[in-house]
Amino acid sequence: MDVESLKTKYEENTAQAKVKELEQELSQPTRNKDMSSLSSDLSHYSQLSLQISQIQKAIKDWEDTKHMIQEEQDSELKEMGNDEIASLEEKIESLDKDIKRTVAGKELADEDDSKSVIIEIRAGAGGDEAALFASDLFRMYSNFSLGKGWDVQIIYDNVTQGGGYKEVIAQISGKNVFKNLKYESGVHRVQRVPVTEASGRIHTSTASVAILPEANDVEVDIKPEDLKIEVMRASGAGGQCVNRTDSAVRITHIPTGIVVSCQETKHQSQNKEKAMAILRSRLYDMKKQEEMQKRSDLRVSQIGSSMRAEKIRTYNFPQNRVTDHRVKMSWYNLEEILNGNIQNVLDDVNNAFLDQLLEKEISSGTKS
């Protein structure tokens, strides 16, 4: 690592001026300004300014220590100084990587990062155990979301007799929900001994997760004549739980064949609105996936539609281990993760993707 070149690179904290500029702009709001975008930019440049200040200080400490070693006669103090130099160089290298990630994160940000999402979880292979795992995953994302101050509303669910989910669809509303959860789409696998397994044999089950950014009417044009809307009596547990009115709604988008349903409320209009939200998100996601297929960069290959069919993560109970197969990383606090403590996992996966993209850019620059 060439500290001298990094000193030149970070000689000026250019982000500091941008922070002041954005703060001034935010203090004089007008109707024409996108306040959400300005706030997001301020958050980005504030973080970048802090990181640059930190690396500037580390480089100054490195210079001072180098100077001290050259002037020092005591061999023991020289040795301590050399240890400090090695430690500072590791710190500088780490800070430089953090800055690159921050810059890359801004440049490669998804236009949907600030949006709320529709999350769809479906049981896969494994019967009742897969349905229970789908329920575990929904609880994990729900707990995480509530801890972030987001709102979670179930739109549709299909509950098994054992209390698991064959399918559950929910709306998670809040700031930067998609930014946090966008890499969670794919097949999740669990390895554990089911409660019903008398012999203690480990079973493997799967569940699929899809994270869809919410779309509005402007982003997706849905023609009324392309919709087949059916109303029916909601299914229930019987007795007083049975809905005696035709409040459940099923919508079929004729051109694509997409079918969505909602029966979560007793009001037909509310169920129709929620079903339309799912339909808009699926159509918007389909549109995005088609655009991604036309591109061939690394980012697309990592989060494109093909990921939906691939095993992305394994939850291994006997080893208390969660492994993400895309970035080849493991965490050894499985229970905490399934209870919703997933911020470290999300951050590690996001940083690993950014590092891969940075390596690709460096490699491309070298070749050219």
Image (spheres, grey):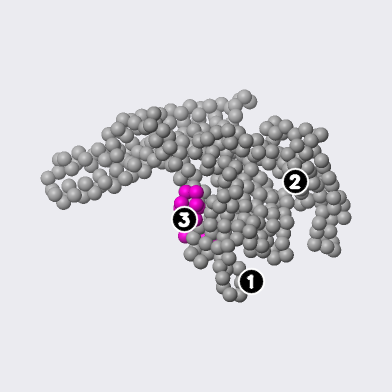
Q: Residue at x 79, y 35 (%)?
A: 226
Residue kind at label 3, given as amino acid type: Ser
Q: Residue at x 63, y 59 (%)?
A: 125
Left/right of residue 220 with respect to residue 192 in the rendered view: right
Q: CA distance from mark 2 to mark 3?
A: 36 Å
Residues at badges 2 and 1 in contact (C-beta under 8 Å)? no
Q: CA distance from mark 2 to mark 1?
A: 33 Å
Residue kind at label 1, given as amino acid type: Thr
Q: Which residue is mark 3?
A: 330
Crowdedness near tag 2: few (<14), some (14–19) or many (≥20) residues, C-alpha within 10 Å:
many
First along the sequence among labels 2 and 3:
2
Q: Which residue is mark 2?
A: 260
Residues at badges 2 and 3 in contact (C-beta under 8 Å)? no
Counting from the top left corner in percent of width and height, residue 122 is at: 66, 54
Look at the image and give the residue range highlighted in magenta: 323-338
Disc assigned to residue 119: none
Q: Which residue is mark 1?
A: 196
Left/right of residue 208 with respect to residue 363 in the rendered view: right
Residue kind at label 2, given as amino acid type: Val
Where disc 2 sits, the SS reads strand
Q: Quadrant of the C terminus?
A: top left
Q: Can you say whether 221 is above or below 190 in the image?
A: above
In this view of the protein, can residue 80 be seen by the observer?
Answer: yes
Counting from the top left corner in percent of width and height, residue 131 is at: 66, 60
Q: Is residue 336 magenta?
A: yes
First along the sequence among labels 3 and 1:
1
Counting from the top left corner in percent of width and height, residue 357 is at: 45, 38
Q: Residue at x 54, y 38 (%)?
A: 300
Q: Can you say whether 94 is above or below 311 in the image?
A: above
Where disc 3 sits, the SS reads strand
Q: How many marks?
A: 3
